């Protein structure tokens, strides 16, 4: 199967800001990532690596940032793993990761990565709003641009992560910085012109000729996100906004040296469960 002949191909003809519930978001995004997985890996696979942990287009690596803390012997859940390169890197650090994703085609790339590297991690196909694990079974959970913006009820996802983490567990996730939502997805000068209200929480939806959603992404403000975390029982330890490296001249979608010099592109939330034993 090639990128030119993806499974369940999608053909969006338009974009809108409109509501999209959980079932619509799951259906659209599973189909999108199944269709786009081969092309995505062809374009970004070298940057992401086969067993590497890069948090964001600003190239902040977990090897340097250590946002997860000590991972040796820790049972770790990756929510929205894509090709699972981060989980394979963690396995090489002595962790015990489990990698979860909505897309079976992305998980096919994860299996290919395991064959390439000889590092095999358990893979699970599931929706981030419904984690198929018992409570208190992971020490750490994380995602680098996976799951969180693609679910309609991200507050539920936070509660699900809190449920499967042991008391005191750490939850770290990277998403597009919410300030970016007021600007067009353009790496050039047009991407510096604010055009969408920051407080417009309607979803970004691409749709096909029948009006059916083919891709859905949801916006939450910084305040929304913090309230979700607190309500789920987390304490925000840090909010990391990686700066654009002076030596980095590459672009990744809407990320570019031009925009990176002016606007934050990524927000990484570092949280800990406030639950305690007993």
Image (cartoon, rainbow, N blue to C red):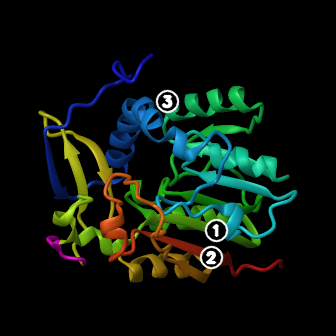
Q: Helix or strand or loop: what does disc 1 sit on? A: strand
Residue 258 position in % (x across, y down): 30, 67
Residue 134 position in % (x across, y down): 72, 53
Q: Which residue is mark 3?
A: 105
Quarter of the image where one finds residue 59:
bottom right
Residue 64 position in % (x across, y down): 69, 67
Q: Which mark is residue 171?
A: 1
Rendered-image quadrant of the C terminus = bottom right
Q: Is residue 251 left or right of residue 156?
A: left
> Counting residues from the N terminus, which is met first, the one under dot 1 or under dot 3?
3
> Counting residues from the N terminus, which is met first, the one under dot 2 or under dot 3?
3
Residue 143 in sight: yes
Task: Find out whether residue 195 is within the magenta segment.
Answer: yes
- Residue visible at 54% across and 49% down? 80
What residue span does the magenta drawing correspond to?
193-198
- Residue visible at 32% across and 77% down? 262
Q: Is residue 18 left or right of residue 175?
A: left
* Disc 1: CA contacts within 10 A as few (<14), some (14-19) or many (>=20): many
Magenta span: predominant SS is loop
- Residue visible at 30% across and 50% down? 216
Label 2 near label 1: C-beta < 8 Å?
yes
Q: Helix or strand or loop: what does disc 2 sit on? A: strand
Q: Which mark is residue 271?
A: 2
How far apart are the alpha carbons under marks 1 and 3? 26 Å
């Amino acid at each position: 199967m090639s990128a030119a002949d993806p499974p369940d191909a999608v053909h969006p003809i338009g974009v809108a800001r409109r509501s999209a519930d959980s079932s619509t978001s799951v259906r659209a995004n599973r189909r999108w990532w199944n269709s786009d997985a081969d092309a995505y890996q062809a374009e970004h696979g070298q940057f992401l690596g086969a067993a590497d942990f890069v948090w964001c287009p600003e190239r902040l690596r977990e090897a340097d940032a250590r946002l997860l803390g000590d991972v040796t012997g820790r049972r770790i859940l990756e929510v929205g793993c894509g090709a699972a390169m981060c989980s394979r890197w963690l396995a090489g650090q002595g962790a015990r990761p489990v990698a979860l994703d909505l897309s079976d085609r992305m998980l096919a790339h994860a299996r290919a990565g395991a064959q390439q590297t000889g590092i095999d991690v358990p893979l699970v196909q599931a929706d981030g709003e419904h984690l198929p694990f018992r409570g208190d079974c992971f020490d750490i959970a994380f995602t680098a641009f996976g799951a969180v913006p693609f679910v309609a009820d991200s507050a539920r996802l936070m509660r699900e992560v809190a449920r499967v983490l042991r008391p005191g567990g750490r939850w770290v996730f990277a998403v597009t910085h919410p300030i970016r939502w007021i600007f067009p997805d353009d790496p050039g000068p047009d991407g510096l012109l604010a055009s969408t209200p920051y407080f417009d929480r309607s979803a970004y939806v691409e749709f096909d000729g029948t009006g059916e959603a083919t891709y859905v992404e949801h916006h939450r403000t910084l305040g929304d996100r913090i309230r979700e975390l607190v309500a789920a029982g987390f304490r925000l330890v840090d909010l990391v906004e990686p700066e654009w490296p002076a030596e980095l001249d590459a672009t990744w979608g809407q990320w570019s040296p031009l925009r990176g010099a002016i606007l934050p592109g990524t927000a990484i939330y570092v949280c800990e469960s406030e639950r305690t034993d007993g």
